[in-house]
Amino acid sequence: MENTIEKALEYVKKVFENDYSGHDFFHTLRVYKMATSIAIKEKADLEIVQLAALLHDVDDVKLSPETHTNKDKARNFLTINNVGETNIETICQIIDEISYRGNDSVVPKTLEGKCVQDADRLDAIGAIGIARAFAYGGNHNREMYNPDISPNLDMDAEEYRNHISTTINHFYEKLFKLKDLMNTDVAKLIAQDRERYMRNYISEFMDEWEGIS
Ligand code: ADP
Ligand code: NI
């Protein structure tokens, strides 16, 4: 198993080497580390959690739309590395369940999926989450902030994926919702601190925008 994890690390390093959209290799590495630490506390199956964490973005709909539905890249990697069929299905199901899709987001069925989803969502909030949001916004030619464009707090998967908005709105449309969507107790605690940090950040941003501070 250790060998498979090392191979997966090498594989994702290659897949994400030219990504500047907030999905770089180090995002996957942080999710892997955080998912491992949550899984140990939750006594979840480490092999499933680690492989799902490492492969969770290789078939992302934005980066690889043609392989997204069947999770072809993850599936091929796991097959080549002799992971059993049942585990492959479990891992692909987790990858499918964890992504944020507005009101169509789901709670993963397995404990392992819950650990990976929490780890992925924790990386979207706090100091790193702020940096990723602005990196994503710049990469997609989004405005940083525009007081004339209001956030849409009630979107299904389709609207969430296709609507044009600002990066500050993204905090309200997704990032501030994540704290209450955490599955595990350990992630809930970390999320509280990261949320507080983001709220302070937004408050400072707005003061500076208005010329108050
Ligand atoms: P994940 O890796 O958690 O599945 P996504 O694919 O949804 O994340 O997005 C990658 C990163 O870009 C995340 O940190 C996310 O919050 C950020 N992001 C996604 N959509 C937007 C957006 N419309 N504006 C700003 N940041 C975004
Ligand atoms: Ni991710």
Image (cartoon, helix red, strand yellow):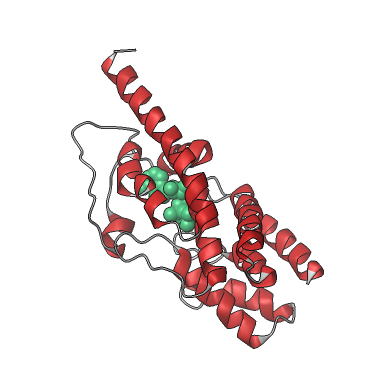
Whole-percent x and y of residue 31? Answer: 60, 54
Residue 195, by quadrant, is top left
Q: Quadrant of the N terminus?
A: bottom right
Q: Looking at this rendering, what residue extends furthest in the right direction?
A: 3
Relative to 195, residue 116 above or below: below
Q: Is residue 178 visible?
A: no
119 vs 7, left or right, is left
149 vs 25, left or right, is left
Whole-percent x and y of residue 188? Answer: 47, 51
| Residue at image location 46% in from the left, 37% down from the top | 130
Camera-side residue: 120 or 194?
A: 194
Relative to 80, residue 153 above or below: above
Camera-side residue: 34 or 93?
A: 34
| Residue at image location 44% in from the left, 62% down from the top | 99
Q: Quadrant of the C terminus?
A: top left
Relative to 98, residue 129 above or below: above
| Residue at image location 55% in from the left, 55% down from the top | 119
Q: Is residue 187 visible?
A: yes
Whole-percent x and y of residue 170? Answer: 34, 44
213 vs 67, left or right, is left
Q: How many marks?
A: 0
Q: Looking at this rendering, what residue extends furthest in the bottom direction?
A: 85
Residue 39, by quadrant, is bottom right
Whole-percent x and y of residue 168? Answer: 33, 37
| Residue at image location 36% in from the left, 61% down from the top | 101
